[in-house]
Image (cartoon, rainbow, N blue to C red):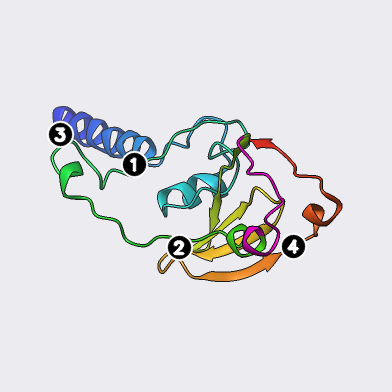
Amino acid sequence: MRLGILALAVGILALLFATEAEQAPTPGASAETTAALRRGEWPAYAGTYASAKYSPLDQITAANVATLRIAWRWTSPDEAIRTTHRDLAPSFLYEATPLMVNRVLYTSTSLSQVVAIDAATGQTKWVFDPGVYKIRKVATSLG
């Protein structure tokens, strides 16, 4: 009887620890951020406010990476502006880290615009253009 109770207790503890391990949060991430990362979102720069740079997603593996295909391509609204303002120099010092929340990507452009993009289709949802290029100042962004 004691052996049965001990086995049951060990089993319950193992189950508790296994459940806890499955739901262990990403270091530096709140429970909300951890849940967002599990949904495939990237809610903060570098994934979390602690800059974890980790995604728990496991759909892409060494076995299937060669089968990946381009889902969509996106053209920055900068292209239309540069077409009409040929005197704007290209911005070579520009990098952006998009955020993804609720299936929407948010990013900035080389002309300091902020854009929302539907993550499933690549369609631009909205653009905020502060007009920085109009005063001939092109911002640089390295992150």
Mark 1–mark 4 Cα distance, whole angstroms, equals 47 Å
In this rendering, the label closer to the viewer, 3 or 1: 1
Mark 3–mark 1 Cα distance, whole angstroms, equals 22 Å
Q: Compare marks 2 and 1 and give the one earlier in the sequence.
A: 1
Q: Compare marks 3 and 2 and give the one earlier in the sequence.
A: 3
Mark 3–mark 2 Cα distance, whole angstroms, equals 53 Å
Image quarter for residue 49?
top right
Mark 3, residue position: 4
Mark 4–mark 3 Cα distance, whole angstroms, equals 69 Å
Side (left or right) of 75 relative to 141: left
Q: Amino acid at mark 2?
A: Ala
The stretch of residues the image draws in magenta is 82-92
Q: Residue 119: give its label.
A: 2
Count of labels in the image: 4
Q: Position of residue 75 (x, y in %)?
A: 50, 61
Secondary structure under badge 4?
loop
**Which is more toward the observer, 120 or 52?**
120
Q: Amino acid at mark 1?
A: Thr
Q: Residue furthest right?
A: 135
Mark 4–mark 2 Cα distance, whole angstroms, equals 20 Å
